[in-house]
Image (cartoon, rainbow, N blue to C red):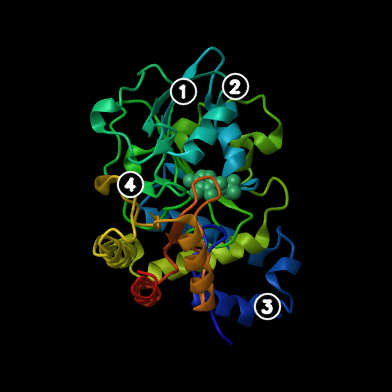
Amino acid sequence: MKRAINFNAGPAAIPQEVLEKAQADMLDWKGTGMSVMEVSHRSKEYEELHNHAQASFKEIAGMGDEWKVIFLQGGASTQFALIPMNFLPEGGSADYLVTGHWSKTAVKEAKRFGKINTISSEKDGVFRSILKPGDIKVDQSSAYVHMTSNNTIFGTQWQDWPDVGSVPLVADMSSDIFSRPFPADRFSLVYAGAQKNLGPSGVVAMAVKEGFLAKAKEDLPSMFSYKVQQANNSLYNTPPCFSIYILDLTLDWIKKQGGLQGMQKVNEEKARILYEAIDSSGGYYDNPVEKASRSKMNVVFRLKSEELEEKFVKEAKAAGIIGVKGHRSVGGIRFSIYNANLVPNVQKSVDFMKDFQKRNG
Ligand SMILES: *Cc1c(COP(=O)(O)O)cnc(C)c1O
């Protein structure tokens, strides 16, 4: 068996330990004589897992009793619509901090539901940095402020969290959740599609403060209502049991790595190795984003021609390094070094980069 060095942007690498546990559990999970996919979501065994995953999420994030964890379907993209549907009151407004493709998409969906103010770091059609503190002037009467903590496509990441005054802060953390400590207290709601840092696709993990959830609208279709989802402990209908199971194992794995402090240490080391290789290449590899905004999760770079980039992707694949082609909207190369990619993978890839440059200098 040969495991790939997997830099896919999402779905992405899952810790090998998690996959091995799932493999061992497959035919007889918890002595049920069934896989987790075959048991009732109303069974004691499943409910235990479901509640354990919620508790782990809160434990890792350092979230107290005022936080509720909800599991949802439809990906982060569905939440782009459900967040304003739930939290934008009639005649109200929300502010969106726009720092990349996904925040732009969130704005597009939110505009269907009310007045959206945007503050954007886009320049000449591209995003090369996050917003500067001085640029962030939030309307204090807004229902909430929405931000994207890491910009998966452009390779930028918030380093310091924005000051939004007393307006509830909502964050799409899909591509860097649990990669580093964050001050949960400053947020009212955080959410992430699991397929980047938390496991497989098919489930969104959302944590919301009780006080903020209390403000959500009531008259919504049940499946779209965060209040209904929470009141039913995310068991209003059949949840994505298998995705939640892998999420739960991944959360256990994160705890074993030393939680968010432990993850941060490894993630900073990976990013340091990779950016150092880029910066010491004499311009052969070029990271187009502002240094202070560089992402530690998605490292993007260009080579001097598209032909050379194509060759890079092809040869990387032949060397067992998968998923390095940049997003179709921006091109170039992208290494998504999420939590499950450990230092040796990054080290081997940097060796490949140096060798490639030597051969194609
Ligand atoms: C991948 C991604 C999304 C889209 O997630 P889906 O689950 O495919 O809808 C949204 N936001 C960010 C920051 C992402 O990285």
Q: CA distance from mark 2 to mark 4?
A: 33 Å
Residue in the image at 56% along x and 84% along y: 2
Crowding at dot 3, Cα within 10 Å, few <14 / some 14-19 / many 20+, comes out as some
- Residue position marked by numbered label 3 in the rendering: 26
Q: What is the three-letter code of the residue carrying label 4?
A: Val
Q: In screen coordinates, is 249 left or right of 358?
A: right
Residue in the image at 62% along x and 61% along y: 243
Q: What is the three-letter code of the residue carrying label 3?
A: Met
Q: CA distance from mark 1 to mark 4?
A: 28 Å
Label 1 vs label 4, nearer the camera: 4
Residue in the image at 60% along x and 32% along y: 81
Query: Residue 289, labelled with which disc?
Result: 4
- Residue position marked by numbered label 2 in the rendering: 113
**Nearer to me, 258 or 278:** 278
Residues at circles 2 and 4 in contact by the CB criterion of under 8 Å: no
Visible residue check, residue 169: yes
* Relative image position of residue 90 (x, y in whole percent): 57, 14
- Residue position marked by numbered label 1 in the rendering: 94
Residues at circles 3 and 2 in contact by the CB criterion of under 8 Å: no
Q: CA distance from mark 3 to mark 2?
A: 43 Å
